[in-house]
Image: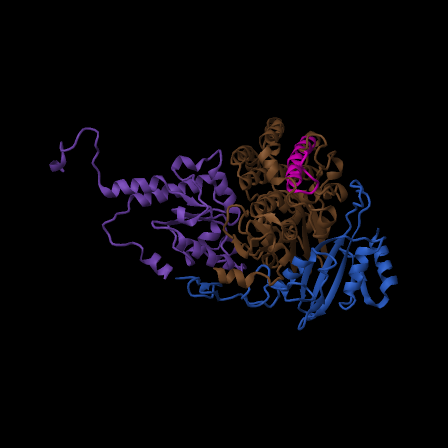
Chain colours: A brown, B blue, C purple
Amino acid sequence: MADTVLESAPDLLMDIDRVEQGDVETEELLINMGPQHPATHGVLRLVLRADGEMVIEAVPHIGYLHRCAEKIGENLQPYQYIPYTDRMDYLAGMNNNQAYSIAVERIAGMEVPERAQYLRVIFAELNRIASHLVAFGTYGLDIGAFTAFLYSFREREMVLDLCEAACGARLTYSYITIGGVHDDVPDGWFDRCLEFLDYFDPKIDEYNQLLSFNQIFVKRTAKVGVVSAEDAIAFGLTGPCLRGSGVKWDLRKSTPYDGYEKFDFDIPIGRPGGTDEIPHSVVVGDSWCRYYVRLEEMKQSVNLIRQAIRNCPEGATLAKKNKTVKLPDDEVYVEIENPRGQLGFYIRGDGSSIPARVKARGPSFCNLSIVRHISNNCLIADVAAIVGSLDVVMGEVDR
Amino acid sequence: MAPEEICGILKSEFGEAVEDACLDCGRPYALVSADSWPKIARFLRDDARLGFNLLCCITSLDMLAENKLAAIYDVCRIPFEGKADLLEFVHEFAVRIEVDRDSPSIPSVAEIWPAADWHEREAFDMMGIVFDGHPDLRRILCPDDWVGYPLLKDYEFPVEYQGIPGTTEHELLSPRH
Amino acid sequence: MSWIENRFEEGVMVTSLDWAINWGRSSSVWPMTFGLACCAIEMMAVGASRFDFDRFGAGAFRAAPRQADLMIVAGTVTYKMASRLKRLYNQMAEPKYVMAMGACTVGGGPYFKHGYHVVKGVDLVVPVDVYVPGCPPRPEALIEGLIRLQDKIKHQTRAKKSMNTFREAAIA
């Protein structure tokens, strides 16, 4: 094992100043963290170069879940490929379906019925809530707070029940499809959804009391893994990770898709400690901010779903001839706002019904690349806090 | 800013290096030469009019018929400049570089956009495009001892890897009657 | 068994050694957290509030292979991961069981044809006791899988020398 670690760790110059602090002579140690580790969110492998408890460098190694999604995309019709997008970011299947569907619709020039757009917004936001709930629960688990996990999964099951009522699946929906959504929602579904939202809205405050403002939690996450706004953009961070650094950037606002321009919502960003209810030790761009942005986003999602249900028109939910779509000899690149950031799909058509090239830009892939940059001079335990706050899904990092 | 305008700026600044442009297709792009790419990239990022600070994605493309490989760089601008509420000023663009399929090599831009680091490694892993000057160019998704570049159109699937059967041609996986 | 009757005090139960050991083993199957992909989320859901794996004595997810009895391979196994999977399996203490959760681990699943980097079934790497199909399987299916495994454990006997010839071959 040690040999493989040494082989794959990059050959870097030793920082002698840091090693020779104090009288005690210390020695650098390579620690292999993952790919099977409870705090690495799947199969992420980190090679830590540590000096005692201090991490000098953490190098992520990925690819343990490389499932050849792009190769498969070149071999299947767009309609057949929808289930594979589910499995890319398996916590946000709806959003991934939506991204690929929009990309195909743009290249084929297909119109989506208005009711389908509203249903897409509803389910994308519901899935955003479910995804952020997992992020919240497992982040607590990484830090050592088990209770949050049980609370978040309790509510998440309710979201899954709503999705299940609409499409029959709990995790991999394939509900949002090319040309609209697969089916209309069943009778009484809107009422059930509103009932859930009324129940869920106050729960977010409960989470805050339970975990966000917990002294131990704040001590573990505040001022840990601070990312400046410039760094965040340079490394291609998007989504809550970028907004946690104080950049107000959301594709739902800047380049709206599926009728997001009709909705009224805020973009929560990381705020410095001391303002409002934020703990004093928090600085903009640290792990706590990234985490808290997600909780605030859930409130916005609740708000969005309420608006969508109120204004949802009657009508068709699926465009005609969506299964026999021909892709012209053109290319298109579409990005949408996934719970983890900007999910992009590149599609190159060649006149047939099978794309010549499909490329997915996973937000977690870019978000993860900053780990090496921000985990210098932190404690080994902080690495778990940093990786957890980025909320990576390995299915999408490796694709 | 419209793509025509961005392309105009690039042409006036770099002349011949901007070989071609496609502005009315699904994704407007400029085709630039590989040699001048670092200069253009730096200009794209630092010019006050353009200011493309976010490299969204590097897409590698196998053009088997023309015996070429292409890399497409999607850049966009996130306005922050100290103030966090400038959402109206948004633009994006794509730059395309085509290289010979037999010896694909493109200068790296990992120094200009750190985000390019992993994207370039991925393009190298999947298509075999070599990015000159990349700080740490090795496979990122496939194992280090993987043979071939999987996303090439003429890639052959491994029959087995480290003793584990791979394709259906392997006796353990072939259909039994 | 008349010779044994009335030989002990009241309250002492007599049973076969097999039954007692199997009862103990099957009631505390501690799984290892071996979440790989989508199925891992369902595995987490089984461990969480609504489905509560603890009811079957299998809620204590262990992070270390040496503390675990059951490896739930939840998600797609890739070639890069296969050697790690085998290593972790070898690190587990006997008796050990493997559950293949989800279509990918059963036989490659949706990645069978074009997945150049996907192992077409985890049974090509480690021996599997229970297969749970589905993509991903519902939590109920995973619970069913566990109950099947418990049935299997309850029928084991110490009389036979070893049923683990395949398993030993895999280690060697």
| Quarter of the figure that contains the C terminus of chain A | bottom right
Q: Is residue A15 left or right of residue C68?
A: right
Q: Is residue C59 magenta?
A: no
| Coordinates of residue A144 in the picture (x, y in percent) | 53, 39
Q: Residue at x 40, y 34 (%)?
A: C55
- The residue furthest front is A23
In this view, A148 is above or below B90: above
Residue C41 as seen in the image, left or right of residue C53: right
Per the picture, the main secondary structure of the magenta-coloured stretch is helix
Image coordinates for residue B175, horizontal then vertical, percent:
43, 61
Q: At x 70% / y 35%, what residue is drawn?
A: A273
Quarter of the figure with residue A311: top right
Front position in the image: A226 or B105: A226
Which residue of the protein is positioned furthest toward the left in this rendering?
C3
Q: Is residue C76 visible?
A: yes
A288 magenta-colored: yes
The magenta region covers A280-307
Relative to B50, residue B33 above or below: below
